[in-house]
Image (tube, rainbow, N blue to C red):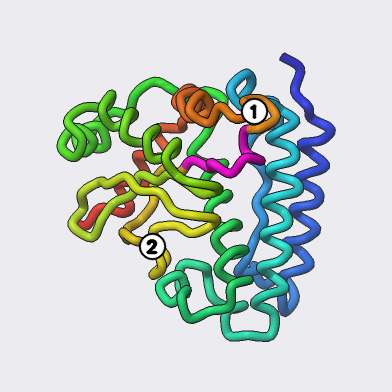
Amino acid sequence: MKKNIGTWLMGMVVAGAVSAAWAQEGDREPVLQFEPLPYAYDALEPYVDAQTMEIHYSRHHQGYFNNLVKAVAGTDLESQPLEAYFGRMSQLPVAVRNNGGGHWNHTLFWKVMSPGGGGIPEGDLLAAMEKAFGSFDEFKKLFEAAAAGRFGSGWAWLSVGADGNLFISSTPNQDNPLMDVAEKRGTPILGLDVWEHAYYLKYQNKRAEYAGAFWNVVNWPEVAARFAAATPE
């Protein structure tokens, strides 16, 4: 399939321009960065269509990033990574919560998908899933249920708890399990965006079908690396 290289490169240019504008004091690396999409807009076809991917990345995610930059400008937050203040998100302005979560969540989302994704995880991650959920198939059922059961907009998550065990949860809007506003806190290693803008052009109101198709593009090596990094020694 012919890749939508032109629009992909345009997204990279926009991302680079915004990141450069956010850099401070010469060549110092900016704290907040809008990273290029790691694949072309149509790379996840037929499971994620190119039009949805382009709108999702270049408009929705870009908007969260731009608004986050504005929300933290002139405050102590602009010199800190997002993870540094997620733990006190309940004390911060709504604009920081919504746009900070939107930027962080989408950055993870793009990375846990890949054109060569799908299949099943291996090694320690698979063993941890079997321990927590009984089997990989049961994990998928529970994760899809969390995605389908989230009323309105939000996310479904697979996270690592403080005890090193995996758990499934969902959060509203652009919240995530790192935030102190989450019902259950932990380190997310896999997330599925269930806002309508993530799937409506292709799946309309069939969120469950969208969640089921997600398994065809999951980047399990990336998820496994995040699991290893989040697991206590």
Total numbered labels placed on residues in the image:
2
- Where's the C terminus, which quadrant? bottom left
Left or right of 139 on screen, residue 37: right
Depicted 15 relative to depicted 217: above or below: below
* Bounds of the magenta segment: 192-199
What is the number of the mark on residue 204?
A: 1
What residue lies at 39% left-to-right and 51% top-to-bottom? 188
Q: Secondary structure at mark 1?
A: loop
Q: Residue 195 occupies which quadrant of the picture?
A: top right
Left or right of 129 on screen, residue 193: right
Foreground: 81 or 152?
A: 152
Q: Amino acid at mark 2?
A: Ala
What residue lies at 37% left-to-right and 35% top-to-bottom? 145
What is the number of the mark on residue 19?
A: none
What is the number of the mark on residue 182?
A: 2
Depicted 173 relative to depicted 28: above or below: above
Foreground: 37 or 71?
A: 71
| Location of residue 151 in the rendering, given as x and y in whole percent from the top left corner | 48, 46
Depicted 226 relative to depicted 102: above or below: above
Q: Residue 147 occupies which quadrant of the picture?
A: top left
Between the residue at mark 2 and the residue at mark 1, the CA separation in whole angstroms equals 28 Å
| Location of residue 123 in the rendering, given as x and y in whole percent from the top left corner | 24, 31
**Magenta residue check for 20:** no
What residue lies at 49% left-to-right and 54% top-to-bottom? 172
| Location of residue 187 in the rendering, given as x and y in whole percent from the top left corner | 35, 56
Q: Residue 163 occupies which quadrant of the picture?
A: bottom left
